[in-house]
Each structure stands twice: as C-alpha cells, then as structure tokens.
Image: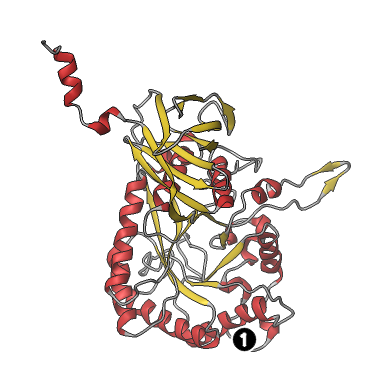
C-alpha cells in the first residue's frame, strides 16, 4: 500500500513540533518554592486627606497596592516623589543633612519623612530593602553622589539609621529590617557620574569600610550591595577585589534592563558564576532593578511607552516566569513610584494598568507556595505553575514577542503528564481584557484557550 506523501511528511516531523504551544504539568514533582519574583521598588501612595469644601484632593493606590502582597520593597529613588516625602526622604543627605555634625547625636538626624514613608510600606505587609546611599543625580552639579570625605563617619551615620529603625534609637522603631544595601549603581561613575563621581578604586575602599563596620555592629543583618548597573566588567573587578580584601557580602545586587527575558536570565547566570568563582558561592543575588528597554538611546521613548502598555506587561510577566528557574533569588521591579518607569499604576490617577495584573497573579501563585514541574513547548511561551491541596493548581502563562510585527493569536494547550483536568477558570490580560474571565475548554482532559501575541492568562484549575 502506498502511503500518501503528506502522511510521510507528517511522520517526519519532530515530536515537539506536533506539540507546539503546549504546556505539560507534572503536579507530582515539586520544583521548589514560588520565589519572590514580585518584589518592587518603592511603596504605595497614601492620600494626604486634604479637602477643599467637600472635595477630597487625595489620590491613592493604597488598596490596590496592598492587594498585590508585595514581599519586598526597595527604597531607591523615593527622593524623586513628593508624596513619599520628596528630597527629605531615605537618602543619606536627607536624613543627615550636615556632614559636619556628630553621628552619635540624635539631633543630627531628620527622620520625619522617612519614618512616615517606611511605615506606609510596612502597613501593606511588605518587608523593606533599605538602600543606604543617594538617589541618582542628573544635573550638571552633583551634591550627594560624591565620595564622602570620611568613609568611617559615613558608616557610623548608616549605623545610626539602622539603630533608629531596628533598635528604637532616637525615638525610633523596632522593625527588624534585615536587608541593608550599600549604594546604587556605582559603575555609573567618574567625574560626571550620575551615581558616583569617584573612580572604582575609591568606591572599593568606601564599600570595604562601610561593609566591615556595619557587619561588625550588626552581625545578624544582611549587609549587601552594591546595586551594579550595566557594567559587568566593573562588577567583576568589584567582586574580585572584595574577595581579596575578605569583605563580607550577604547579598549581591545588580540591575538588568532588556527586551527579552532570555537576556535577563543570561546576565543572572553570568553574575552567579562570577560570585561562585570568587568565593561567594551561595550568596543570594538580588536583581533589584529591572524593566523593559529596547535600547537607551533612540529607542528610549519607544521603550517607556511600551513598558506602560500591554507589551511591557507581557514582558514583565514573562521575565517573572523565566526568573523562577534562573539563578535569581529576588526580583524587584523598577518602579512603583508614579513616573514614566511605572508599568503597574497609572502615573496620573494611580489606578492599576496592564502590568498590575501579572503582580496580582504572582501573589496568588505564592499563596500556594510550592511550584510544580512544568515543560513548555513552543517559542515565546512562558509558564509557572503552583500546586495546592486536593489537586488544585494555579498557573501564569505568558505569550511574549519582542517582534512588533507579530499579530496572530495562537491556541494554547495545557495538559497533565498523568491525569486530566476536571475544571478550570482563566483570567486574561491583553489589549482588550484586564484580568477578565474568558472562555477556556477542557477536551480529552486537556485545557485549551486562545492567546494574543503579547498577553498573559492566570489559571485556576482542579486536576485528578
């Protein structure tokens, strides 16, 4: 009997091509914890409570923010936003405005605005990663990003801040803030540097002095940094030098802006290897600034517009999924501060926009805690699945394309390695929907639904 040529061609196809756009879940195999991929920079906006007549002027995103169950909030660049306290908040020069004063004297410090800001973050249930240092400075004259005249005195000021928030010193609190980060993007350096006007050798001396002093005073706290920006050679020089000087690093922080999740994962792998190769094996890595960027020059305006729309939201969701299995311990998205970098809340109304819903989905995954083993077959497709009790599953599935010309929807199949789905409900976020319940179908025990190119779905299902 002759076999038709079409059938022969079908038989020659690789098995994976027959399962394109398929996600296979094995709930019996645990794949670790659902990690803290939903950390963020900066806190909620709390209404001021000002009224004119019967009109309340206060804008707020507090209830929406709290619903996200953000685990960690980093305080960098809070200084830019007036509702947080503006130039009187967080930065070393804001809290200790006159460097000639005595660090042992509580009167040398101004904690007022920072106390309020941190208390508002804590009221959401989040823990704090406190950035000890300065907000980035773009003006031609630099004020706070210059190397201090006395590194040990700077360290003692930092000590005073820690004692205020953890030991009640200077009419303070006992908040047990664990993570204290030394500086931000010191690789943006040099005479015209936006974050550090000294050279790298000067920063290495500074970091060594501050780290060793704080670790001696607070051995149980996590003293880390230095929030390296773009320069991986700078990061290599830093890690190698700290290892030579036997400087403790309780967590290593760095940043990554990219247009594909794969680029973020590749940088994470290089940072992990750098640490492991230089005696810092097991030191947690905090990717504590990240977002969508096509490029920093001609593509910057495009990138800022994209990150606040559906493309940026899909990238955010895809990066979270990719980071779940990458050597990244914590992600902290930049930024929740109302600004052009915020893809979570509208800059004017502070209401949720498209990127909000992937953070809400991740919060729901973390409520289950444990991840199930997942195999994703298909390009530009990402997924993480959390397993609960009695066959309950929650999943985030993302379709993300950096190619702007991709315009076709695709059919997605989610199946179990063993067993079948009994029920399901999916919520879709795309150009038309914002976490809206949309149709899905169970056929032969598998879940099927359609996804637009840049979109994500949150799934709640029961399986047996």
Residue 195, x across and y down, in percent: 44, 66
Q: Is residue 424 above or below residue 66?
A: above
Residue 27, x across and y down, in percent: 45, 45
Side (left or right) of 180 relative to 87: left
Q: Is residue 425 above or below residue 373?
A: above
Q: Is residue 392 above or below residue 213?
A: above
View extreme (right): residue: 53
What's the residue at 39%, 48% (across, down)? 322
Under tag 1, what secondary structure? loop
Q: Is residue 104 above or below residue 82?
A: below
View extreme (left): residue: 2
What's the residue at 54%, 60% (across, down)? 77
Residue 163, quarter of picture: bottom right
| Quadrant occupied by the N terminus | top left
Q: How is the image coloured?
A: secondary structure
Side (left or right) of 71 relative to 109: left
In depth, the one of 366 and 311 nearer the eye is 366
Residue 460 in view (yes/no) = no
Residue 78 in view (yes/no) = yes
Q: Which residue is mark 1?
A: 101
Q: Residues within 10 Å of mark 1 (few under 14, many from 20)?
A: few
């Amino acid at each position: 009997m002759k076999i038709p040529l079409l059938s022969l061609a079908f038989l020659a196809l690789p098995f994976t091509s027959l399962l394109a756009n398929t996600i296979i879940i094995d709930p019996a195999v645990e794949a670790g914890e659902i990690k803290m991929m939903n950390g963020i920079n900066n806190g909620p906006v709390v209404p001021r409570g000002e009224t004119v007549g019967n009109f309340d002027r206060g804008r707020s995103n507090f209830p929406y923010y709290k619903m996200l169950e953000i685990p960690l909030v980093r305080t960098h660049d809070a200084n830019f936003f007036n509702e947080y306290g503006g130039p009187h908040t967080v930065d070393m020069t804001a809290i200790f405005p006159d460097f000639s004063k005595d660090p042992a004297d509580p009167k040398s410090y101004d904690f007022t605005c920072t106390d309020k800001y941190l208390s508002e973050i804590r009221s959401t249930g989040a823990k704090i990663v406190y950035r000890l240092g300065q907000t980035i400075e773009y003006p031609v004259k630099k004020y706070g990003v210059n190397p201090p005249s006395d590194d040990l005195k700077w360290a003692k000021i930092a000590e005073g801040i820690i004692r205020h928030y953890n030991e009640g010193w200077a009419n303070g609190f006992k908040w047990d803030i664990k993570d204290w980060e030394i500086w931000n993007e010191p690789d943006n350096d040099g005479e015209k540097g936006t974050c550090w006007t000294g050279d790298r050798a000067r920063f290495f001396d500074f970091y060594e002095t501050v780290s060793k002093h704080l670790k001696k005073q607070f051995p149980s706290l996590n003293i880390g940094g230095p929030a390296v920006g773009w320069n991986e050679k700078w990061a290599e020089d830093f890690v190698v030098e700290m290892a030579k000087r036997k400087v403790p690093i309780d967590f290593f922080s760095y940043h990554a802006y990219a247009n594909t999740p794969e680029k973020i994962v590749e940088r994470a792998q290089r940072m992990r290897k750098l640490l492991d190769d230089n005696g810092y094996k097991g030191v947690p890595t905090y990717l504590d600034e990240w977002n969508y960027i096509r490029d920093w020059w001609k593509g910057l305006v495009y990138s800022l517009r994209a990150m606040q729309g559906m493309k940026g939201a899909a990238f955010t969701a895809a990066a979270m999924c990719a980071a779940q299995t990458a050597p990244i311990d914590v992600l902290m998205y930049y930024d929740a501060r109302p600004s052009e970098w915020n893809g979570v809340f509208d800059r004017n109304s502070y209401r949720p926009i498209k990127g909000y819903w992937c953070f809400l989905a991740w919060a729901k995954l973390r409520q289950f805690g444990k991840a199930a083993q997942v195999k994703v077959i298909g390009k530009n497709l990402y997924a993480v699945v959390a397993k609960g009790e009695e066959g309950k599953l929650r999943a985030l599935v993302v379709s993300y394309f950096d190619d702007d010309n991709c315009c076709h929807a695709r059919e997605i199949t989610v199946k179990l390695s063993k067993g079948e789905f009994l029920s399901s409900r999916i919520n879709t976020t795309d150009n038309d929907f914002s976490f809206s319940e949309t149709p899905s179908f169970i056929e032969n025990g598998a879940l099927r639904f359609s996804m637009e190119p840049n979109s994500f779905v949150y799934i709640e299902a029961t399986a047996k």
